[in-house]
Amino acid sequence: TIKSLQKDIFDKTFQIEELQTSLEIKAKELESLQERVKSLYTTAVDKTSQTDEVQNTVENNEVHLDELHVQMQRERIRELEVTIQEMKQLEETRKTLPQNS
């Protein structure tokens, strides 16, 4: 009957309105999640960039340490060469001194 059909139409209209409201809420939640994903992606990109910078710094420091180590070794070799020369000169000087028996 008409009353029954009107009630069905009213109920269906109400259900449609509830579904529409639910869809709007879900759309806002989805939008919020999309913003969160963008934010996380940006953070990940920043962290990756920072990690690359740290890695480069570590590598540069390792190279610098290697260079310092080589430089220190060279300086030590020079010091030893000077010491050897001084010892040779002392030995030569000792040979030229009169020998006490």
Image (tube, rainbow, N blue to C red):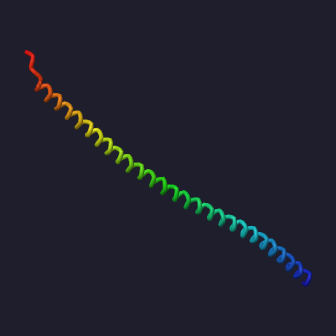
Where residue 90 appears, x then y in whole percent?
17, 28
Compared to 10, does 50 lie above or below? above
Where residue 80 appears, x then y in whole percent?
24, 36
The N terminus lies in quadrant: bottom right
Relative horizontal placement of residue 91, taking residue 68 as reference (left or right): left
The C terminus lies in quadrant: top left
Residue in view at x 36 percent, y 45 percent? 68
Relative horizontal placement of residue 17, taking residue 67 as reference (left or right): right
Residue in view at x 32 percent, y 44 percent? 71
Quarter of the figure with residue 73: top left
Question: Which of 24/101 is in front?
Answer: 101
Question: Which of 56/2 is in front?
Answer: 56
Relative horizontal placement of residue 42, taking residue 18 as reference (left or right): left
Relative horizontal placement of residue 60, taking residue 94 as reference (left or right): right
Residue in view at x 59 percent, y 59 percent? 43
Compared to 47, does 17 lie above or below? below
Q: How many marks?
A: 0
- Residue that lies at the very extreme toward the left in this rendered image: 101
Question: Which of 92/60 is in front?
Answer: 92
- Residue that lies at the very extreme toward the right in this rendered image: 3
Where residue 74 appears, x then y in whole percent?
28, 43
Residue in view at x 22 percent, y 37 percent? 81
- Residue that lies at the very extreme toward the top in this rendered image: 101
